[in-house]
Image (tube, helix red, strand yellow):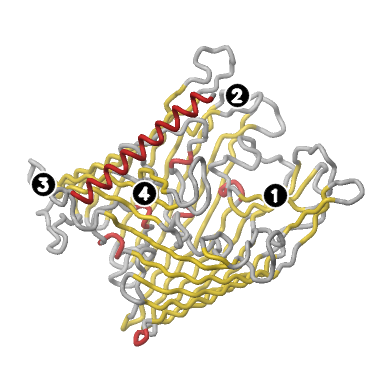
Amino acid sequence: MQSRFSHNGHRFNGFRSLMAGLLAFATIAPATAVAGDFIDTRLSFVMSDDNLLSDPGESLINSPEFDMGARNGIRYPFESLNSQDEGDETMTHLVMYKEMPGFVKNLTTDAAFVARLAVLTQPENGFSTSDIKIRDAGSYLRARYSFTDVTVDEKTGHTLDSDRQLELTFFPTNADRFRAGYTYDLSWGGNKIFTSQKSQFATPGFRLRFDWDGFYALAGAKSTRQIILTKDNNDVANRELGAFWGGIFGLGYVANMWGVEVNGGIFDSGINPKQGVQGEEVVSGGLSARVSAFSEGFAPEASIDYRLYRNNDDSFEASNFFLRKPKNYEDFTWRVSVEGNWLTQTLASFEVLGETKRVNAFAAAVRADFYIGKLAINIDLVYRDLYFILFNVPSLDPFYALPKDSESKPEILFAVKGEYWIEEANLLPSLQFGIQKPASYRGRVSETINPSELTGGKQTVAIMDSSTIIAFPNGNEPKEIYSIKFQLRWDLSDMMSLIAQLNYNYDRNQLGRKKDAVDFTAEYYMRDPHVLGLGIFAQARF
């Protein structure tokens, strides 16, 4: 056992040495690297308190009192719907990019090595606090053929995408940027759709896309390797690695002031390991659609996490998430989109041993942005049912469909935000209000060893997200969470800001637990629902 850990340690140290060499090379070799090889960089200094009204241990999300360092309790689920990040991370991307014209007229080839370097705020899987975690963030090779003469951006020297082109993109190790769906938190078909966590293999893929005057069509595939589980435990192939594939397709038409898009896919997600259905395939798939309308000159919103990184910031300027600068429109400007998602998956039947069944998952979103001079208003309404939230787990009891006699309720999020740019003082005050109705489940659960209020034939749980499940005492139901946040941002330059925020939550789902003094069983109670958080940030983005 010791030798295996030692071997893994040597392997990890070797990887860190390799990355250190790459970083040093990027620094000392200006002949092959250009300014801006480190892009999408966010440096965040944070002083905060999740809850000024409680001491450590007195709130559901523990609040270690006011101190310095990032924490989770001052963010809401509707603040980063279109990104994998929350916005207060300290991280960067190393991008080594090269573009060259092809030997065929109007053919352009380019490639990028993209590494994400994130500074950890707490120990994680062998890393220590303040260590840097490195992973591939969408390295790619691409060939673009333009059916018209190519155009070069005078500022960057890069070839611009053509309105009429054929594009082939290869992702050598990580095709997670190639997804179905549109809003990031409602997207699916990423790397996590493959179910096995035992073998952390790469997920390479490719995508072919055709564009012609606003119309586009795309198709592609990705694959990974996972442990095979056959019905016969004595099978020689059992518990060996096997190949698992998935495919994504899409098409759409985006005109001057409106757009209609649809995409979908099907995946051989993994093998069901549950008794009676061991060896059965978990087949996942679905369809997503979006209808958009917007002012002339705008376009449907796209997450920064779908974009291919290059060592210039043109793609970030088009994103509302990265370096979001205050807007000042002379005319009334707007953008509205409606998105719907239907997914399906094969899981084990809860009632009949040895049988599988198809389950359906649904999600939808209405998103709107309005700009009136220096005033910006953003509105989000999101619906996600329980199967959709837990699609990558999959399900509440992993690989099992929900019992027929159970009840589940969807998650509903509503948020409205207004901000006004005080240009003379470089100030951006904003006010945001949100309501979250958590998804919930009421049904049969496994019995526990020690009796308590939570045991019995049925139980109610609230599902805040795929990794946060709160069990409720019998007779209690999850309730809506009301949130309001005031934030004041003072821009010191185009890259650096000082930010102060005060947020209040009225959360009646703050479950607490204590030990009974007589029989030592667990007693559950509801904590104080009032949560008042404070955050002070210094942040640079470039």
Residue under pointer 2 = 278
Q: Secondary structure at mark 1?
A: strand
Identify which amino acid the numbered label 3 is placed on. Answer: Pro
Residue bearing the label numbered 4: 116
Residue 446 coordinates in the image, percent (x, y): 75, 38
Label 4 environment density (alpha carbons within 10 Å; few <14, some 14–19, many ≥20): many
Residue in front for this viewpoint, 391 or 218: 391
Camera-nearest label, 3 or 2: 3
- The CA distance from mark 3 to mark 2 is 51 Å
283 relative position to 531: left or right? left
SS of the residue at dot 3? strand
Label number found at residue 101: 3
Distance between the Cα atoms at labels 2 and 4? 37 Å
Q: Nearer the viewer, mark 2 or mark 4?
A: 4
Q: Earlier in the sequence, mark 3 or mark 4?
A: 3
Identify the residue position indicated by label 1 in the image: 441
Image quadrant where one finds the N terminus: top right
Q: Earlier in the sequence, mark 1 or mark 4?
A: 4
Mark 1 vs mark 4, foreground winner is 4
Q: Secondary structure at mark 2?
A: loop
Residue 325 located left or right of residue 1: left
Across and down, in percent, residue 334 comes to: 38, 74
